Amino acid sequence: MVSSVNEPFKITEDVKANVKRFNSLSSRLERWAKRIDRPFYRFTEKAEERHGIKGHVTANVRRWNEKTKSYGEWITVDDHDNLVTNAGKDYFFIQCYQTTGIAANGINYQAVTTTAITPAVGDTTLSGEMTTLGFSRAQGTYAHTVATNTCTITTTFTATGAATNVQAGGLFSAASAGTMGHEFTFTATTFATNDQLQLIVTVTYT
């Protein structure tokens, strides 16, 4: 199994308030008196909060039974943290805070590949992205409970033919091209016709 652990995406807030006063003799005396009463008195204050955004991927597989014409149970083949790309971090800031460049869609399209990759924060595309056999990029289902710290994006692929060593994926903002916000690997798995792959990406804000 190849896994990629993503460092928490931390947001630090640094607020400074600077005060400029008229430098009269009475003002200087007043400030001098305050420093005597409160040795640590200062006009600049810093408030810091630390947050993190983490991605996690769960890969589930279920097999089609040709004899019974039914599916077996979902089997988890991998479950670990994924990598948030630099482009994904930029996308987050733009959507949350900027007044221009805001996209019409979130990062909820999933793509997979049979290529053995090593996820890197600078990646912007998924090497060898599949476009056939039922594994073309597809929009996942977004789920979130109000006032909680997580959301999930779930996508299910159904093989239309034999596919060998499907083993990595990415989460994008569009059906083609777009921004790749997350990248991940999972155990290489081979699929027969009608077998299914389910990818659940969980994003946690702490």
Image (cartoon, rainbow, N blue to C red):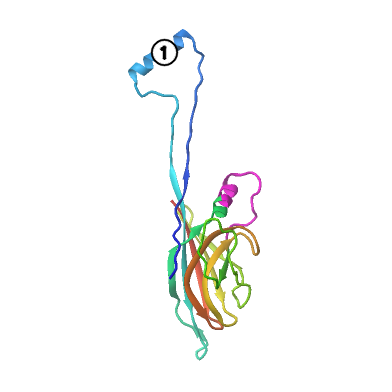
Find out whether residue 2 is within the magenta segment.
Answer: no
**Percent x, y of residue 3:** 44, 65
Q: Residue at x 44, y 79 (%)?
A: 73
Q: Residue at x 49, y 77 (%)?
A: 189
Q: Residue at x 56, y 77 (%)?
A: 158
Query: Which image quarter is the N terminus in?
Result: bottom left
For the residue pair 150 and 193, the one nearer the viewer reads as 193
Crowding near pointer 1: few (<14 within 10 Å), some, many (20+)?
few
The residue that disc 1 covers is 30
Is 52 displayed left or right of 171 in the figure? left
Question: Identity of the amino acid at label 1?
Answer: Glu
Is 51 displayed left or right of 87 in the figure? left
Find out whether residue 95 is within the magenta segment.
Answer: yes
**Percent x, y of residue 95:** 59, 49
Q: Looking at the image, is 52 positioned above or below residue 194?
A: above
Q: Residue at x 38, y 17 (%)?
A: 34
Q: Looking at the image, is 188 positioned above or below residue 180?
A: below
Under circle 1, the secondary element is: helix
Is 112 displayed left or right of 4 in the figure? right
**Percent x, y of residue 204:** 46, 56
Q: Residue furthest top?
A: 25
Q: What range is drawn magenta here?
A: 90-107
Residue 176 occupies quadrant = bottom right
Q: Looking at the image, is 153 positioned above or below residue 38?
A: below
Q: Looking at the image, is 98 positioned above or below residue 165?
A: above
**Percent x, y of residue 80:** 43, 64
